[in-house]
Image (cartoon, rainbow, N blue to C red):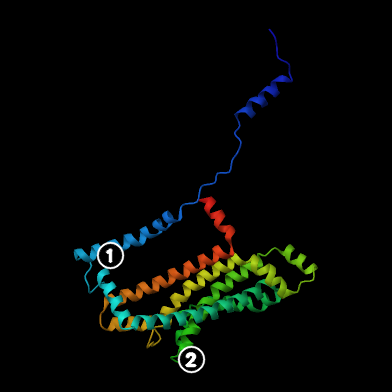
Amino acid sequence: MTTPAAGHAPTDTRAALAAGLVTPRAQLRRPRPRALAALLRTLGPLALLGGWALASATGALTQDVLASPAQVVGAVRELWDNGQLADALTVSLTRAGLGLLLGATTGLVLGVVTGFTRLGEELLDSAIQVLRTVPFLALVPLFMVWFGITETAKVALIGVATSFPMYVSASGGVRNTDRKLVEAMRSFGLGRWAIVRTVVLPGALPSLLSGLRLSMTLSVIALIAAEEINSTEGIGYLMAQAQNYSRTDVLAVCILIYGLLGLAADGFVRILERLLMPWRRVVRGAAR
């Protein structure tokens, strides 16, 4: 009986194993077509709208509880024709925009200071964390005492509400900046402001955009609270008038406007992400 050489068996075994191996390939899925993605995004709202219309048509949802979609469309046309809707939108968007600008700028500056400098963190972070735990709605009576029933109180309330999400995101993003890269820039003679502008802020951009998204969403929530401070104009004023006259169609219009403002804010940040961070679009498309 012939016995194979001792050195041939391991070689044959390795060859057999190698023959059964498959060359690994990256499992990249093709990105979903934009038309299909847009259609999928509209299915949920369309289902809600269809259920609302069906409940109104069958009488399960009466007008004194909630107006039908057709009545809401009629209320939109009525408010637009008499100019009330355009005026209210202008006032409310101005309030939300000014408050967001004030709050996001303040949160960004404080976040960069506490995240980039140890002295800033030691002096400011603990105090800001204490203030962050105070619900902004609890500040409404105090702001009315300080500023009276004025636009300043409303803008300041929105500014306070939107500053803390941006502060947390900016501070965390700045702290996560590669310290070796910062030290390398310092060795080239760059000053602090130049390092912040060219290294820290670009590195913290994902966190900053996440903070901006949260701040913009909170600006709409704070706007609703701010317009409860004896407003005489704006979407909140329309809601108060509709409540007095039991106009559920106008109430539904105002609620939908608040929701659309939040959706538009989120879409605006998504556009910024695509413009400022185009590489994330590639990664997201490959992951689907």
**Could you tell me which secondary element the residue under label 2 belongs to?**
helix
**Residue at image point 48% right, 82% down:** 157
Closest to the observer, 8 or 25: 25
> How far across and down, in percent of the image, does residue 117 sit?
70, 74
Q: Is residue 254 left or right of residue 288?
A: left
Question: Quick one: 84 or 49, which is closer to the camera?
Answer: 84
Query: Mark 1 Cα within 10 Å, few/some/many (few <14, many 20+)?
Result: some
Residue 124 drawn at (x, y percent): 64, 78
Say which label, 1 or 2, has the lower sequence index: 1
Pick out the residue farthest to the top: 1
Is 137 placed left or right of 177 in the picture? left
In which quarter of the view is residue 79 placed?
Answer: bottom left
**Residue 193 image point, x, y percent:** 71, 75
Eye-nearest disc, 1 or 2:
1
In depth, the one of 148 and 260 nearer the eye is 260
Q: Are circles 1 and 2 on residues that touch, CB within 8 Å? A: no
Q: Which residue is mark 2?
A: 147
Q: Residue at x 35, y 74 (%)?
A: 255
User: Dot 1 lies on which element?
Assistant: helix
Kind of residue at disc 2: Phe
Identify the residue shown where x is 32% and y is 59%: 47
Distance (Cα) linking label 1 and label 2: 42 Å
Does 186 sit left or right of 231 as displayed?
Answer: right
Which amino acid type is marked by label 1?
Trp
**Residue 142 visible in the snapshot:** no
| Residue located farthest toward the left when viewing the structure as drawn | 59
- Number of labels in the image equals 2
For residue 52, the mark is: 1
Q: Is residue 45 visible?
A: yes
